[in-house]
Amino acid sequence: MTRALPAQRTMTVTMPIPGRMGRAFRDGILLPRPGTEVVGPHFLEWVAGERGGEADGG
C-alpha cells in the first residue's frame, strides 16, 4: 500500500495494540467478508485519482 504513495522521507512507527482488539486487527477483522458488496474505487484507482495519473501497483 505504501509503495503506491508519492516518495517522501518517512519513518515507520510500530504501534502494538495489545489484547483482543490487537489480535482482531492482526486477524483481519476490518476486511470485508466474502459476499460483501464493496462500493467505491479500489485502492490503486483511488491513489491514481489523487495523483492525477496512473498507479503502478508495484
Image (cartoon, rainbow, N blue to C red):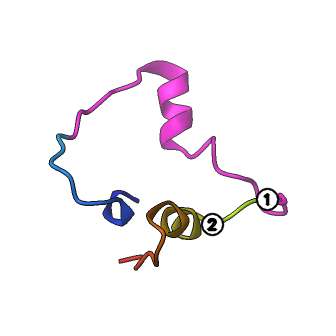
Left/right placement of residue 57 relative to residue 46 reads left
Is residue 22 one of those drawn in magenta? yes
Give coordinates of residue 46: x percent, y percent: 57, 62
Report the front residue among 38 and 53. 53
Q: Residue at x 52, y 37 (%)?
A: 25
Give me the C-alpha separation between circle 1 and circle 2: 9 Å
Q: Residue at x 32, y 64 (%)?
A: 3
Give coordinates of residue 19: x percent, y percent: 47, 20
Is residue 19 one of those drawn in magenta? yes
How many marks can you see? 2
Left/right placement of residue 36 relative to residue 57 reads right
Q: Mark 1 = which residue?
A: 39
Q: Residue at x 37, y 65 (%)?
A: 4
Give coordinates of residue 56: x percent, y percent: 40, 79
Report the front residue among 58 and 14. 58
Q: Which residues are magenta?
A: 12-38
Toward which corner of the image does residue 6 lie, by quadrant? bottom left
Toward which corner of the image does residue 57 lie, by quadrant? bottom left
Amino acid under label 2?
Answer: His
> In the image, which disc is placed on residue 42?
2
Give coordinates of residue 1: x percent, y percent: 41, 59
> In the image, which disc is placed on residue 9?
none
Report the front residue among 52 and 18. 52
Secondary structure, magenta segment, majority class: loop
Mark 2 element type = loop
Amino acid under label 1?
Answer: Val
Mark 1 element type = loop
Left/right placement of residue 25 relative to residue 14 reads right
Look at the picture and state if 12 lies above or below 42: above
Q: Quadrant of the C terminus?
A: bottom left
Q: Residues within 10 Å of mark 1 (few under 14, many from 20)?
A: few
Q: Residue at x 57, y 70 (%)?
A: 45
